[in-house]
Amino acid sequence: MKNEREKNTPPAERILVAAMEVFAAQGFAGGTMEAIASRAGVNKAAIYYHVGGKAALYETVLRRFFGRTADVLEAAVDGAPDAASGMSALIASVSAQFRDNPSLPRIMMHEWARYGASLSEGVLLELGRLLRCTQKALKRGVAEGVFRETPVWPLHLAIVGPMLLFSVTREVRARVSSHPAAADLRLIMSFDEMSRALTGILLGSLTAPAAGARRTAQAENTP
Amino acid sequence: MKNEREKNTPPAERILVAAMEVFAAQGFAGGTMEAIASRAGVNKAAIYYHVGGKAALYETVLRRFFGRTADVLEAAVDGAPDAASGMSALIASVSAQFRDNPSLPRIMMHEWARYGASLSEGVLLELGRLLRCTQKALKRGVAEGVFRETPVWPLHLAIVGPMLLFSVTREVRARVSSHPAAADLRLIMSFDEMSRALTGILLGSLTAPAAGARRTAQAENTP
Amino acid sequence: MKNEREKNTPPAERILVAAMEVFAAQGFAGGTMEAIASRAGVNKAAIYYHVGGKAALYETVLRRFFGRTADVLEAAVDGAPDAASGMSALIASVSAQFRDNPSLPRIMMHEWARYGASLSEGVLLELGRLLRCTQKALKRGVAEGVFRETPVWPLHLAIVGPMLLFSVTREVRARVSSHPAAADLRLIMSFDEMSRALTGILLGSLTAPAAGARRTAQAENTP
Amino acid sequence: MKNEREKNTPPAERILVAAMEVFAAQGFAGGTMEAIASRAGVNKAAIYYHVGGKAALYETVLRRFFGRTADVLEAAVDGAPDAASGMSALIASVSAQFRDNPSLPRIMMHEWARYGASLSEGVLLELGRLLRCTQKALKRGVAEGVFRETPVWPLHLAIVGPMLLFSVTREVRARVSSHPAAADLRLIMSFDEMSRALTGILLGSLTAPAAGARRTAQAENTP
DNA sequence: AATGAATGAGGCTTCATTCAT
DNA sequence: CATGAATGAAGCCTCATTCAT
C-alpha cells in the first residue's frame, strides 16, 4: 500500500504497477493476486473487475511496460546526432530504463526463462520494437561508414544481456560485496559506470578495423 | 518419466535432474513436487526421504549444477595455451554448457530475477568460482601484455549475459523466425556462431589500443 | 439481450422473463444475477432497484408464472362442454403450457427437487390452484357418472408428472435419438402426440369399469 | 458426519453417498464441496484425491446410482411370473427405489431440468437401461396377448413421471397437509398406496379393449 | 527404501450486494 | 432511474508436507 499516490492514480493504473512489481519479484507463478491487490491498495475482486484474471493481468503488464520501454529507446536512438552517439545513447537508455524501473529486467528474465510462455502476439510486437532499435542504430553507423558490418542479433544480446544481469544482481552484489573474498572484484558499480564500460567494449569492437575478429578466428582454429 | 535411464540411475540423482528441469521451466514457485516426482519416476514422498523439502531440493540443485559448471569452466581456462585462446575457450565453454544443459541458463535467470532469494552461502561460493574464471582469463592476458586493463565485472557480464539471453530465447526465436517481420533479423543462429560472434566483439575490444573507449567517452560528453 | 422487444417492454417485465429463463436452465443456485441482467438488457443494479435481491426475484418468478399457468388451466377446464372433454382439455392445456413456455417445467422440477425451499405461502397458493383444476375436472366426471371415484392426488401426478418429464427431456431426446441403440424407442414425439397418448391412458382408466384396479391388486398380492 | 458407519465404509464410498445427498438437495451448482466433505467426514482435498473435481464427482454419482437402480428394476421385471405382475413389479420397484433412496428422484429432476448438462455417454447408457425395463415389460404383455400395443415412451413417462413427482413432494406435502384448504386433497399417502393407485391406472389402460383410446380421440376432435 | 492416503493452508475466481453519482 | 465501481464472502482447486505401513 504505497500511500504516496494512492489517492490520485486511478485503480487500474495502480493495479498494473503493483502487478509489475510483484511479478518481477516472484515470477508469474509466485506472484499472488492477494499480494498485488494489497500493494495496489484495492480489493482482490477489483483486479478482476478492471483487468481480468491473472493471465490477462500478466500479459497486460508485459505489453504495457515493454511498449513504454520501446518508446523511450526509439526516441533515444532517433534523437542522436551521429551513429556513434546513437549507439551510446541506446546503451545508456537501456541502462537508465533498467535503473529507473527495476521491475523491468526482472520480469523480462522470468519471462524468457519460462520459454516466453506468456508472450502473445501483442507482446512479441513490443519486443520486436526493442530489437529494431539496435538494428537502426547499427545500420546508421554502417551507412555512415563508421561501424563494421555486424550481425544485429548478437549485438542486441551484447547490449541487453549484460545490462539485464547487471540490474538484477544489484541486491545480491550489495549483500556479497562486504565479503572479503569479493573485495578485489569491484562488484559495486553505478549504472552509469556499467553503461560506459559496456559502451567502451561494444563501440570499440564496432569501430575497430575488424582485426579483432580475424585474430579471434585464428585463435579458435589454431589448437 | 524418462524411461531411458530410469533403471540405472539412483533415485536421488534422478530426482535432482528432474528438479533441475522442472524448476528451470517453471521457476521455484511454479515447479511442483508432483511434477518433479513424476518426471523422476518416483513417489512424491521419496523426494522428502532422499533430499528433503522443496527449498532444500532447490538449493541442492543450484549448488550441484553451478558447481559442475564452474568445474568445466575452470578446466577450460586452465587448459588454454595462451591468454587469447583462454578467453576464447572460456566463452566457448559457457556457450557449450548452456547448449548441452538448457536448464542451466533458465534456472540462473529465474534465480537472479528473484533477488537471489535462494542463494545460500554455498551457492554463492559456486557462483564466485564462475566469476573467478573470467578474472583468471583476464589477468593472464594483462600479465602477458595482450589485454588492456579492464574491470572484471563488466567483462564477466558481457560474456555471460549475452549467452544467457541467447540460450533461453532459443524456442521463442524458433517460433517467431518464420514471421515475415523477423525475416531480416537472422534470429536463428547456432551456439557456435553466437559464441564466435561474441568472442569477436570481446576479444576485439580487449586487444584494441583503447581508442574505442576514449572515443566513446567523448561521444557521451559531447551533447 | 433479446433485441426483439427490448424497447417496448418495461424493464421490470424483461427482468422477470430473463430470470425465468436463467433459473430454469441453471436452477436457483446456478443462475447468476449477471446472467439475468445481461439477458434482460439491464444493469445488474437495476434488478435490485426493480425487484429486489435474488431470493425475491426467484419467488416473484415462481408466483408470477405459476399463477398465469393456473389461470390458463382453470379457463380450459371451465370452458369444456362435458366431463370427458374437460379432462382432455386439462391435459392438452398442461401440454400446451409446457410447450409454449419451456422454462415452466424446468423451474418446477428444480424447485421440487430442492424440497420446495422457495415455496412461500403465496407460491403454494398458486400451486394449489393447479391441483384444484384436476379436482374440478375429476369431480365433474364423477358427478356426471362417467368417471369412477378416483383419488385426486395420484391423478394429478399422473397428468403433470409425465408431461413434465416429457417436456424437459426434449433436448436430450433429440441429442440421443440418432443413436442406433435408441432407434426402436421412438423418443421423438410432438407435444400433441404425447398429450393424446396420455389422455388415452388416463381417460381409459377413468372410464373403465374398475376391473383393472381389482386385477392389479390381485397381481400385487400373488407373489 | 453420519457417525453410524463412518468407521467401516471406505472414504471413496462415503464421499459418493454424501455427494449424492448434497447434490440431490441443492443441485449441481448449489451443492458445495465443503458440504459434501463434511457430510462424508473427510477433508475437502480427499475428494480430489479419490474422485476428482466437482464435475467428475457429479458424473460418478449419476452413473453409480442410476446404474444400481437399473440393476434393481431389471431384476424385478425379469423375476415376474407373468406380464401383468411384471408391470406391477416394475412400478412397485420404481416406487421402492424412490422411497428407499430419496436422493435418486431429486437428482434426476435436477439433472433433467438442467438440460442433462452432465449426461455423459456413460450416464446415458444407464438411463437407457431404465427405459429398456419398461420396454421389456410392455413387450412381454403384448406377446402374451394381455396388453394392447402401446408406445413405450409415453408409458415409461407415465410410470416414472408420477412417481418422481410423488417422491420429491413428500416434505412439502407434509408441511402443507395440515392447512385447512388442503384437507380434502388427501395429500398424504404412502409409497405403496401411490404405487398401487398408479398400477391401477396404467394396467387398467393397458389391458382395456382399447375402447378408452377411441373414445378419447372422439372427445378431442368433437369440439 | 518406498508409497498410498490424507490434510491444512493458501491461491484463483465468482458472485450477490451496496453505493455514489 | 440507471449505472460503473467496489467489495466481503465463499467456492473450487492445488500443493507442500506428513504419516502409517
Image: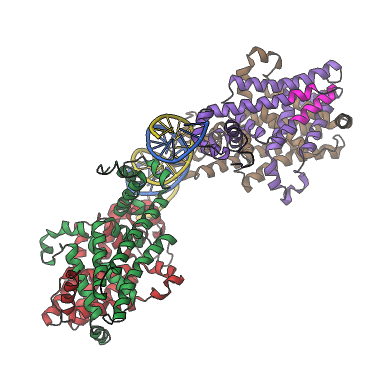
Chain colours: A brown, B purple, C red, D green, E blue, F yellow
Near-viewer residue (B111 or C186) = C186
Q: Nearer the viewer, residue A204 or B23?
A: B23
In this rendering, position of residue A152 left or right of residue C216: right
From the top left corner, tell me how far across and down residue C95 is, in percent. 30, 73
Image quarter where the N terminus of chain B lies is top right
Q: Which residues are magenta?
A: B73-93
- Work out whether residue C85 or residue B49 is closer to the camera in this orientation and state it: B49
In-front residue for pair A72/C145: C145
Residue A75 can be seen in this image: no
> Is residue B92 rendered magenta in the image?
yes
Please tell me which residue is depicted at 28% across the width and 86% down the height of the picture. D221
Q: Is residue C138 above or below residue B166?
A: below
**Image height of D211 relative to B123, above or below:** below
Which quadrant of the figure has residue B157?
A: top right
The answer to whether any part of residue A185 appears in the image is: yes
Main secondary structure of the magenta stretch: helix
Q: Residue at x 67, y 19 (%)?
A: A188
Specify the quadrant that holds the C terminus of chain B: top right
| Number of numbered markers | 0
Percent coordinates x, y for residue C194 in the rendering = 32, 76
Q: Is residue A215 toward the left or the right of residue D113 in the image? A: right
Using the rendered view, name the quadrant where residue A45 is placed.
top left
Q: In the rendering, at what x and y percent does residue A83 appear?
A: 81, 35
Q: Is residue D207 above or below residue C41?
A: below
* B41 is within the stretch colored magenta: no
Residue D141: quarter of image: bottom left
Residue at the top extreme, as displayed: A180
Name the spot of residue B196 as percent of width and height, x first: 81, 34
